[in-house]
Image (cartoon, grey):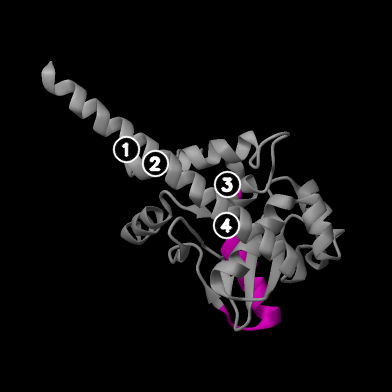
Amino acid sequence: MFKEIQDWMAQRCGKFTASEIYKLMGSGKKDYFSLVAKTYISQKAAEILTLEPSNRPNTMAMDWGQSHEYEAYTKFKELYGEIDYFGGENPTFFSYSKYSGGSPDALGKDFVLEIKCPYNSSEHLNHLMMETAEDLKDGKPEYYWQVVANMIFTGKDKAIFVSYDPRFEPEYQLKTLKINLNFDDASLLKERLVEAEIHLDGLLNKINAKGANSSKGSKGI
């Protein structure tokens, strides 16, 4: 199991992933990319140069989500039938381009499954109130763009967003929200991903050029 997770992390290293793709969607006042987007691109460059993934804090919220994800998947499966699960001990990275890819929680025949198990029950309550993809896009844009990215990365045009909280009464524990791929949003994400990869390549080329110049200059020392 440990080797599988190590391999999965190595595949993600230096890649724009679905879970953080929302960081590329913001623009600056004068620049194509926001400061958040530029910082994210720089982080990917650092990962490529060091072969080390960016540090991700092991928080209580992450622990809660990971420990309840399979339970959520099981309850979903009881309603919708067997689908391929990629969480827990079976993480799978779907490579899309040179610098991008995603890890959906599960895949059906024609849809992506994205599972969230909120640590704060108020967040699950907000999910219960959502009825459309636009609701998710407005309320939790990071989740919306993650779903869109994983649809693109896996070649699906449908998704089901799942929110699960076992602390609610049984009838309110599992929320499912069906999402069809919005082609305008998909085109926008692809456009920004292309620009991010150009920006990343440019950054790496500058660093490599500086490294080469430094090596030449050190010969006379």
* Distance between mark 2 and mark 1 Cα atoms: 6 Å
Front-most of residues 60 and 84: 84
197 within the magenta span: no
**What's the residue at 48%, 62% (across, down)?**
88
Label ID, residue 208: 1
**Coordinates of residue 152 in the picture (x, y in percent):** 60, 68
Q: Which residue is mark 2?
A: 204
Pointer 2 and pointer 1: residues touching (CB < 8 Å)? yes
Q: Is residue 154 above or below residue 60?
A: below
The C terminus is located in which quarter? top left
Q: Earlier in the sequence, mark 2 or mark 3?
A: 3
Question: Of the residues shown, which amino acid type is indicated by label 4?
Answer: Ala
* Distance between mark 1 and mark 4 Cα atoms: 27 Å
Label ID, residue 62: 3
Residues drawn in magenta:
64-83
Q: Is residue 125 above or below residue 174?
A: above
Element type where label 1 sits in the image: helix
* Distance between mark 3 and mark 1 Cα atoms: 36 Å
* Horizontal side of residue 184 vs 35, given as left or right: right
Please state which of the two labelled residues, at mark 4 or mark 3, is closer to the viewer. Answer: 4
**Coordinates of residue 170 in the picture (x, y in percent):** 78, 66
**What's the residue at 56%, 51% (across, down)?**
195
Number of residues whose C-alpha sits closer than 10 Å to that of mark 1, classed few (under 14), some (14–19) or many (20 or more):
few
* Distance between mark 4 and mark 2 Cα atoms: 22 Å
* Distance between mark 4 and mark 3 Cα atoms: 17 Å
Question: Of the residues shown, which amino acid type is indicated by label 1?
Answer: Asn
Q: Earlier in the sequence, mark 4 or mark 3?
A: 4
Element type where label 4 sits in the image: helix
Q: Quadrant of residue 59?
A: top right
